[in-house]
Amino acid sequence: MAFWDLPQQFWAIARKFDELLSLQKRTEKSVDAILERLHALELRVIQLEADRGQMITEAKAAAGVAASGVASMIVSDAITRITRLEIQLADQPPRPPSSALPELPA
């Protein structure tokens, strides 16, 4: 290696170093973009989990309301039927006691 080749060698090393710095900057930008996307996905997942929790709570409340509605319909129907039976029994003449009934011939 001759003495006059030294500046050329330094220039080649400086260009390689500049290329490495350029590559590092592009890599940093790419990594930052990936981190931003990951952060956005993380926020979206958190939002979806919160929405899922809210949907579960609302579904439980709706199921409770539906069950309450069905139960109230059943109770209402039973009360109506019992009331009708009581009215029918009140309209019939009283039955004599069973000991007062004549015995049927065998």
Image (cartoon, rainbow, N blue to C red):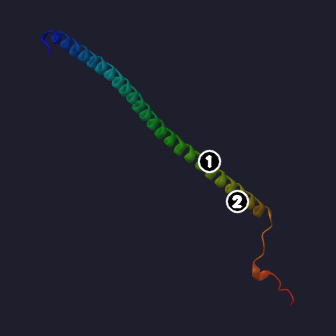
Which numbered marker is on residue 69?
1
Where is residue 85 drawn, in percent x and y?
74, 61
Q: Is residue 41 left or right of residue 6?
A: right
Q: Is residue 9 left or right of residue 44?
A: left
Q: Position of residue 25 (x, y in %)?
A: 30, 18
Position of 42 compared to 5: left or right?
right
Position of the N terminus, as image quadrant, is top left
Vertically, is 23 above or below 89? above
- Residue at (25% x, 14% y) in the render: 15
Circle 2 residues within 10 Å: few <14, some 14–19, many ≥20:
few
Res 16 quadrant in image: top left
Q: CA distance from mark 2 to mark 1?
A: 20 Å
Query: Depth check: 82 or 53 in front?
Result: 53
Decide: is 59 above or below 75.
above
Q: Position of residue 27 (x, y in %)?
A: 32, 23
Residue lying farthest to the front in this orientation = 2
Q: Secondary structure at mark 2?
A: helix
Q: Residue at x 85, y 86 (%)?
A: 104
- Evaluate if marks 2 and 1 touch, with contact meaning CB atoms under 8 Å apart: no
In the image, is 68 to the left or to the right of 104? left
Name the residue beneath numbered marker 2: 82
Identity of the residue drawn at 63% across and 50% down: 70
Q: Where residue 79 sits in the image (x, y, percent)?
A: 67, 56
